Amino acid sequence: MKPALALVDCNNFYASCERIFDPKLEGRPVVVLSNNDGCVVARSNEAKALGIPMGIPFFEIKPLVEKHQILVFSSNYTLYADMSDRVMETLSHFTPHIEVYSIDEAFLDLSGIPEDRTEYGRRIRQTVRQWTGLPVSIGIGATKTLAKVANKLAKKSDKAAGVLDLTDSPWLDQALRRIEVQDVWGVGRQISRKLKAAGIHTALDLREANLNWIKSQFGIQGVRTVMELQGRRCWQLEENPPAKQSITVSRGFGRLITELDPLQEATALYAARAGEKLRAEGLAAGAMNVFVTTSRFVEKSRRYMQHCVIPFETATEDTQELIAAAVAAVEQIYKKGYEYKKSGVMLLDLAPRDKVQGGLFDVKDRARSRRLMETIDRINRIGSAAIHWAAEGIQQPWKARFAHKTPAYTTRWTDLPKIH
DNA sequence: TCTGGGGTCCTAGGACCC
DNA sequence: TCTGGGGTCCTAGGACCC
């Protein structure tokens, strides 16, 4: 039995999600913006064809948007997360051996599939389309890295029609020759620059590279990438994702902050969000890293960045404690005279909450606090964040902008699309 | 005017140990 | 010409991923 891994990847995921609920968008250029309507993070094929690069600041393409009537959307994470769940659920009908790799990608182990893998891929593709409305591409290879390669070509080639199987393929070398080295999984900007300087331009060149040289230049990770291209598995399918090691919530502000109060309010809100994530994972945090920063784009003399780590005597999952720590930390690192653009909290030293060691001098009633947090989380899951903490402030003028946001079509009753 | 957010792994170097 | 060998733990920073 030949080992085979499939990478299923949603095409232009965020843009496609927006399209499902508005058929008028079909065939038109669509872009989706990052938080605060800052950068382009997803583009429909039509938008890509207009030359709009990934990650470009929105204000730089405004003239192009006008000229070509490009449709612009703010990120609607609630919608994307729900659509992602539906896709993954659909995929799990085809094999129990699945690794959800990101919001729009999953690896599937197809080693045991008796039928033609390309045919099987086509069926997966068609089913996802029918059940969720989303287009996906599927690449199949002996390793994750080769599945990635196949996926890339499946997207590019009309002949593949969205599915390409490179296991046992006579076309494998030719396929690798068509992949530029910076498009290989694990090869980013720095590494591709060095590789090209050494005359390695394609995935095929990289596969044939000298392993000792690779090790000396790029360490063990580089060796693994080359071996994976050779068809030797270095990365296994992770069916049970390992427990999280850190949880971060950070966000740029809708407008610059100069005073301490609003900086504390914003950071308190992020601490509360982090607490929700923490409890959803069944974890408790042993420490918190709090940071504030000015914009990266102002001149050096106006830049300031500081962070501060607060350890907790007893690992906690209590938002009151998280907020208190965040507020105190911000007070410590705040410096007057700067225009702050962003702050955030990172929860560290995470451990299952049931294994938390009580501190010797811990007087807190943990069972009571847990019940309170569970109740608040439950209420906030039903209504959209019905309960707030006073420390988050009321007006929140620093909240990010989402000027082009669509409704929560699939997760809020009042936002259900209506059919006339 | 406007420039994302959330992660992981690896490496190098220092402190310390036997 | 010479420098012991091997190990752990921690941290900061770099590189990568989506």
Image (spheres, coloured by chain):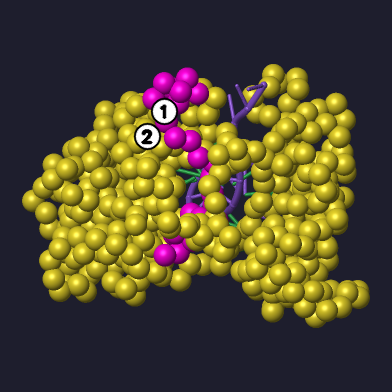
Chain colours: A yellow, B purple, C green
Image point (34%, 27%), residue name: A50
User: Residue A297, located in which quarter of the rendered image?
Assistant: top right
Is A187 displayed left or right of A345 in the figure? left
Mark 1 is on which residue type?
Gln
What amino acid is at disc 2?
Pro
The answer to whether the residues at label 2 and label 1 have Cβ atoms under 8 Å apart is yes
Q: Quadrant of residue A199?
A: top left
Residue for point 64% across, 57% down: A247
Identify the subunit bearing mark 1.
Answer: A
Q: Which residue position holds label 1?
A: A69
Residue C6 or A186: which is nearer the viewer? A186
What span is colored magenta in the figure? A62-86
For residue A79, side relative to residue A398 (left or right):
left
The residue lying at 58 percent from left, 36 percent from top is: A37
Left or right side of A91 for A378: right
Q: From the top left corner, tell me how far across and down residue A397 is, in percent.
A: 77, 39
Seen from the viewer's position, the closer of residues A89 and A165 is A89
In the rendered picture of this protein, how many numbered marks are placed on residues? 2
Q: Quadrant of residue A296?
A: top right
Say what secondary structure mark 1 lies in: loop
Q: Is residue A148 above or below residue A55?
A: below
* Front one among A69 and A64: A69
Q: Secondary structure at mark 2?
A: loop
- Magenta: main secondary structure equals helix
Residue A29's disc is: 2
Give me the disc on residue A387: none
| Residue beneath the point at 87% across and 41% down | A261
Residue A229 lies, with reference to residue A358, above or below; the image says: above
